[in-house]
Amino acid sequence: MKPREIKPGIYCVGAIDWDRRLFDSLIPLPDGTSYNSYLIKGNEKTALIDTVDTTMQEVLINNLSELGINSLDYLVANHAEQDHCGTIPQVLEKYPEAKVVCTPKCKGMLIDLLMIPEEKFITVNDKETLSLGDRTLEFIHAPWVHWPETMLTYLREDKILFPTDFLGSHLATTDLYVSDEGQVYEAAKRYYAEIMMPFRTTIQKNLEKIEDYAIDIIAPSHGPMYDKPEFILKAYHSWAFDEPKNIVVLPYISMHGSTRKMVEYLVEALSRRGVTVKQFDLVVTDIGKLAIALVDAATVVIGTPTVLAGPHPNVAYAAILANALRPNLKFVSIIGSYGWGGKTVEQLAAMIPNLKVEILEPVLCKGFPKEDDFKALDNLAATIAEKHKENNFT
Ligand code: FEO
């Protein structure tokens, strides 16, 4: 994408990656992504906010040339992850006079990751400012959105917040600003679930920290910008602060149909009791969809057959992932079928130490489920419905 003017002297100069389908070799990107980079010209100095992923370095370098940028004073690195910093070496090669502006922790990480020489850096403290002449950058330290070194940059005169990954979305679009709120809500919630949810309490603090700033535009490092900031701030507030809802997430695997029968029965039993259930067959599910569902769920019931004396490996993967994402769950249970024995419950329980949950009595059955097993599933559904009611999860 060619440079696009946001305001006189402020340009979006990053790259849209329509075809990328996996991030960190882990996270599905059904809608691609973008690596947003912003150029800000003051009447004395010029700054670039973040760069782009190395794979798209030519887009950024060409955009800077097209804008006729002959010298660059500051290269602000809000975050050290390579999708934003990967092109710093190439920008410094083109503009050897530029200084990299970042937090002290980010400096260390950039030296480690990209071997940028020490003398290239200016480190900034929380709330420190940098003048571009008629424009002022203020740096807001915001660790753990989603690495320990992250900061946000606020352009005072224009009331633009550049919050790095915070508040962003993996979404490739030609729209400079959000135009389809439904689409961006889903993409931003997916992003929150996969990247930010593990740091929910620091997200809460960072949301509070930016409450005092007048913000007209939020310009994140992925996805479209927000010219109605309240849209994303309200959504984040709800995801980070709200109590869980009356929702059960049910990820499962079935090899020969017995566990599937139990899952189907439990879904009916919960639904009859007014509990919303989101069921995910882990053979085909997009783990991003599962992560989104975990944002609001009060309970997870894991469905697994016993295989090789433990849970199915796909279920173990989902449990480890859920443990890492640290959703605000309150209850967990396990259901499934076994042939002759095993340690399924013990092994799964050991995989979720981060989840501060009450474990509800699992229902494991030998072979295909029978009358007593269905009764046990009814009891589990009744217990879950009652627990949700007691806690006012609606
Ligand atoms: Fe978009 Fe944490 O990098």
Image (cartoon, rainbow, N blue to C red):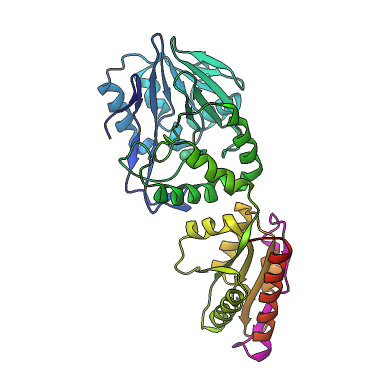
Is residue 357 shown above or below 335?
above
Q: Residue 98: x and y, percent?
A: 42, 16
In the displayed structure image, the side of residue 36 where residue 148 appears, left or right: right
Which quadrant holds residue 199?
top right
Is residue 267 shown above or below 89?
below
Q: Is residue 342 visible?
A: no
Is residue 117 shown above or below 238?
above
In the displayed structure image, the side of residue 289 where residue 375 appears, left or right: right
In the displayed structure image, the side of residue 129 where residue 29 appears, left or right: left
Q: In the displayed image of the protein, which residue is found farthest to the bottom? A: 371
Residue 118 lies within the magenta run: no
Q: Residue 175: x and y, percent?
A: 32, 40
Residue lying at 65% horizontally and 91% vertically, measured from the top left: 371
Residue lying at 51% horizontally and 20% vertically, measured from the top left: 101
State the quadrant of the N terminus.
Answer: top left
Residue 360 lies within the magenta run: yes
Q: Residue 346: x and y, percent?
A: 72, 69
Q: Which residues are magenta?
A: 350-373
- Nearest the camera: 271 or 137? 271
Which quadrant holds residue 393?
bottom right
